Amino acid sequence: MSTVQNLFLKAMSATHTGLYRLTGGAIGGKMMGAPILLLTTKGRKTGLERTTPLLYLADGDALVIVASKGGAPEHPAWFHNLKANPRVTIQIGRERTGADAREATPEERARLWPQLTAMYSGYAAYQKKTTREIPLVILHRDGTASS
């Protein structure tokens, strides 16, 4: 991605996050019918909190997010951040909670990918656009079982 594209995405993400927080998700809580959460990670280099709005899929007690970065050749920064520190904060609506993040196993990915592409067809287009396998991340909120 070019520098201009990255700056545009950062500005859009910051605006989305601000509106989501201000309205408790009434604005920015869904995109094309799919639910959105706010993921806050700790920057692996800066130590600063970074928040990103992301589509999610509920899978039992777990939540699943996709490290697509629009099909860019590299993983999104938030993915590298949570790999370095899997302890994250998520916000759904007005509810904020801690969570533990981990990359989906190949078996989980095989089961979840069709559900995610059914929820948002853009993911399939993103995967075709890049040579990397787009990672899926499983979030286990505090107080829920982890597998």
Image: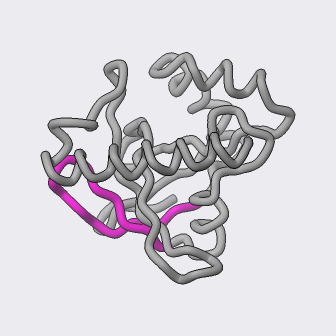
Q: Position of residue 139 (x, y in %)?
A: 46, 56
Badge count: 0
Q: Is residue 91 magenta?
A: yes
The answer to whether residue 146 is above or below residue 117 is: below
* Range of magenta residues: 87-102
Q: Residue furthest right?
A: 131
Q: Position of residue 101 (x, y in %)?
A: 52, 62
User: Where does the N terminus fall, quadrant-wise?
Assistant: top right
Residue occupying the point 39% across, 66% down: 99
Residue occupying the point 66% across, 63% down: 80
Q: Is residue 140 left or right of residue 147?
A: left
Q: Position of residue 29 (x, y in %)?
A: 26, 37
The answer to whether residue 55 is above or below residue 31 is: below
Q: Position of residue 26 (x, y in %)?
A: 15, 37
Q: Is residue 48 magenta?
A: no
Residues 143 and 50: in front is 50
Q: How is the image coloured?
A: one colour
Residues 143 and 3: in front is 3
Residue occupying the point 43% across, 47% down: 13
Magenta-colored segment: predominant secondary structure: strand
Q: Is residue 58 left or right of residue 48?
A: left
Q: Residue furthest bottom?
A: 47
Q: Is residue 118 left or right of residue 140?
A: right
The answer to whether residue 100 is above or below residue 93 is: below
